Image (cartoon, grey):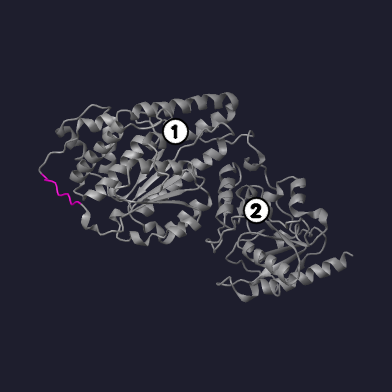
Amino acid sequence: MNPMMHHTPAEASGDSRASGSSSHELQKLDRVSKLLVGFISQLNKEEYESSRLKASIGTALFKHVMRYAPENSHYFNRDRLVVSGHYAGRWQDLFVHLIAAKGIAVDPLGVASVFSRTTTLPCHSNQAISSAIGQAIAMRNLTMLYNKPGLELLDNMIWCVIDDAKFQQDSALNTVALAGSWKLSNLCIIYDSMYDPMSDKLEVNNLKTRGWNVIELVNDDDLTITALCTALSTSRRSNAPTLISVQSPNSSLSHWLHSHPNNNTPLYLPPELYDVFQDVFKKSNLYEADWLVRVKRYRELYPALAREFWNHVAGKPATITQHQTALTGPITPPLSPWPAEQPSRRGEHSSLGRDKFSPHPDRRSRPGRTKPETLHIRPCDAEEAAGAFLVSIRSTKLPTTISLPQNGAASFPDHSSRLGVTLGAYAFSKCHDEDFDLTLITAGVGIHYAMGTQEFLIREYGLKARIVSCPCLRLFQLQTEEYRRSVLQVQSRKPTVAIDFGNSQGWKPYADALVLLKESVNVEIEANMPNRIGPRVKDFVKEFKKRNT
């Protein structure tokens, strides 16, 4: 067990009123846990170990960690819960019933009616995780729009409980990778391996490399509700999405206590269980009251944004106001058509490609291909894709199209910027001493080749290249001249080389030459490798310096 996990559930859940737990309270919590285990085992005809874990997870979430208002569905800052598999249906019904009863015990006949309803078929982890990530993205977007320093309007969590590891397969894994890249710290997934025969194949390191915080626990006698509360509360303070993996003990399963209750025994919930969950309403009212204080303060300081926020909550269309910064403002200025021919920023445009430009459209989008009234964005990785979605959400007049790269798994965590995408172009990779020989400008999958070429040029020729990512040329055109010049470094009088597939038309105003990448089903062809691009770029830089001396 983790030596850190020795706090009380009240402390782990952030309840400042509790500074510790007495021996009597711990004994009561232990007894309540055993009562819940017995009831869940009888209700679902499950073995002891799996029932114990379900009881612990439910108690930790519903009583100690989740912040919600059982009687007020309009409490917008409440935590959300998504479940799948064996956690759908009766598991939720049990804890919702214990809380809704407000400490008043229900007779066995009433208890039976609660659990007699027909439940819908449970979803698998793929569906649950996709839903949870979707909700986390939606809430994160609202926090980026409305949270202010020192005044967080939204700080809720999305919790997801799953009992299989199928999310490691196919498209679900791509969704998980996006959540890690986008640093969805408001997301926590709890994985119960007790029902999963593939649990030993959970690839924890893959999740860690994709930006997830992983907490591993073992479902043995040391796994208490207190330990679970501490792990769950750690995820609330994390700066990345969290996976809490609860695995079976490594020892033989022969020590498990098999529970085969008499099916004729009526369901019975002891009054002691109702008493334990009675204080949930009181804590929930405190959470809601605290949030309403923040809402009132927010309305006083930012009245226009407050109106927008409540329009979002009500599902009404809302126009983003000008109270926000330029980085997150709306994209509303009208765009005029681009001239049919534009000179490069220093005169005639040079092509470093070996073939003529193809008159036929290729599979990849490129500058100048879409209509001028459309914002077309080509992100290079998940971080830039997040920026593309931000632009799409904030664009109130112009439609947006987004072309994702074929190598979607590639990422550039130390370089790519979602906020940079909202400006159309930005400095992607700078030289450490700001002394450079040329600028490489590209978009989308072209970043992959630009990074390789940058490394090749410095290694083989000692040429220092900075890289500019320009995922949306038209959006870049809307920025101030001062910003455009700062990105392109026009005042340096150093050459700029564009790297892209197909037509060079869109790059002419911003680059002195174009490296024309070859089209192929396999984009990793020899002609597109740095050792083929680098020498052509080097020759052009030499020619450029000679011409401008």
- At 19% from the left and 30% from the top, the residue drawn is 106
Q: Mark 1 or mark 2: which comes first in sequence?
A: 1
Residue 330 visible to the viewer: no
Query: Where does the image place residue 386, in percent across and percent down from the top left?
Result: 56, 50
- At 38% from the left and 46% from the top, the residue drawn is 160
Q: How many discs appear?
A: 2
Circle 2 residues within 10 Å: few <14, some 14–19, many ≥20: many
Amino acid at pointer 2: Cys
Q: Secondary structure at mark 2?
A: loop
Q: Secondary structure at mark 1?
A: loop
Q: Nearer the viewer, residue 212 or 407?
A: 212
Q: The C terminus appears in which quarter of the rendering?
A: bottom right
Amino acid at pointer 1: Phe
- Along the horizontal axis of the image, is 497 left or right of 422? right
Q: Which of pointers 1 and 2 indicates the residue nearer the eye? A: 1
Task: Tell me the number on the disc at residue 472.
Answer: 2
Labels 1 and 2 touching (C-beta < 8 A)? no
What range is drawn magenta here?
257-263
Q: State yes or no: residue 128 in magenta.
A: no
Q: Residue furthest left?
A: 264
Task: Tell me the number on the disc at residue 76.
Answer: 1
Q: Nearer the viewer, residue 90 or 18?
A: 18
Q: State yes or no: residue 262 in magenta.
A: yes
Give the main secondary structure, helix, strand or loop, of the magenta stretch.
loop
Query: Where does the image place residue 372, in percent across and percent down from the top left?
Result: 66, 52
Circle 1 residues within 10 Å: few <14, some 14–19, many ≥20: some
Per the model, the C-alpha gap separating discs 1 and 2 is: 35 Å
- Along the horizontal axis of the image, is 203 left or right of 382? left
Quadrant for residue 413, please give it. bottom right
Quadrant for residue 283, please give it. top left
Query: Where does the image place residue 548, in percent across and percent down from the top left?
Result: 87, 64
